Image: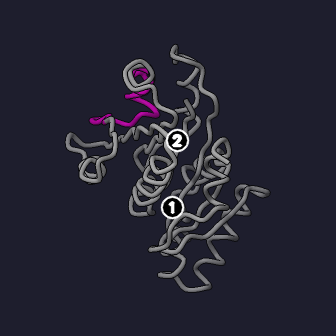
Amino acid sequence: MHLLLVTGFLGSGKTTLVVKLAQTAVEQGQRVAILVNEIGEIGIDDQLMRQLDLNVWEMLNGCICCTLSADLVTTLQKLDQEYDADLAILEPSGAAEPDNILRALPYYRGRPLESIRSVSVLDPLRLPELFQVLTPLITKQLVHAELLLITKADLATAEQVEETRRLAAQVHPGAPVVTLLAGEPLSVQILAELMPWAR
């Protein structure tokens, strides 16, 4: 099973990316499970995903990077035993710290994970302002990502996209930075970055 971690703040486009990626992987014949973590008691994103006939596993009432880290491990093990997924896509809450999530994974006792990848979703309409007040958290999300994905490039100005690209390069120099238009499908380049085993 491959594990893909999708981080980003509320409204950045995480759920849209997860849905597009899951649908593409299913069309390729992969068994896909989506693990959704929401702070509240009722999951909104998972309801949308279920309406799209996607396999969703909920983790509610806390953040998987701290209070629910044991639940993450248990859920992954249950997923391995009961569903035999090729790909598990993990969408944590917007405030999750990837390093804490990654520290929980050695406690997983299912079949060995074939790969662990991470993408950080960046909203050019809000990132520069968020960066001024949430620098440590945003930095932690970016430095653990193999891919930095700027969403909503068609809704932002060229200056906003360029400022987001500059901040991303400043925090995680050398990481691939790609842009995605709000309504476009995932490109071959993005799919290759997120699912290199599927080439």
Q: Is residue 181 left or right of residue 56?
A: right
Q: Is residue 94 left or right of residue 28?
A: left
Amino acid type assigned to the residue bearing label 1 in the image: Val
State the separation of the CA atoms marked 1 and 2. Answer: 16 Å
x and y percentages locating residue 54 in the rendered image: 33, 45
Which residue is disc 1 drawn over?
A: 133
x and y percentages locating residue 62 in the rendered image: 32, 35
Question: What is the span of residues highlighted in magenta in the rendered image?
Answer: 58-76
**28 in the magenta segment:** no
Name the residue at 55% across, 41% down: 4
Q: Earlier in the sequence, mark 1 or mark 2?
A: 2
- In the image, residue 106 sits, relative to residue 24, either above or below, namely above
x and y percentages locating residue 27 in the rendered image: 46, 51
Which residue is disc 2 drawn over?
A: 97
Instruction: State which quadrant residue 188 falls in.
Output: bottom right
Name the residue at 64% across, 33% down: 115
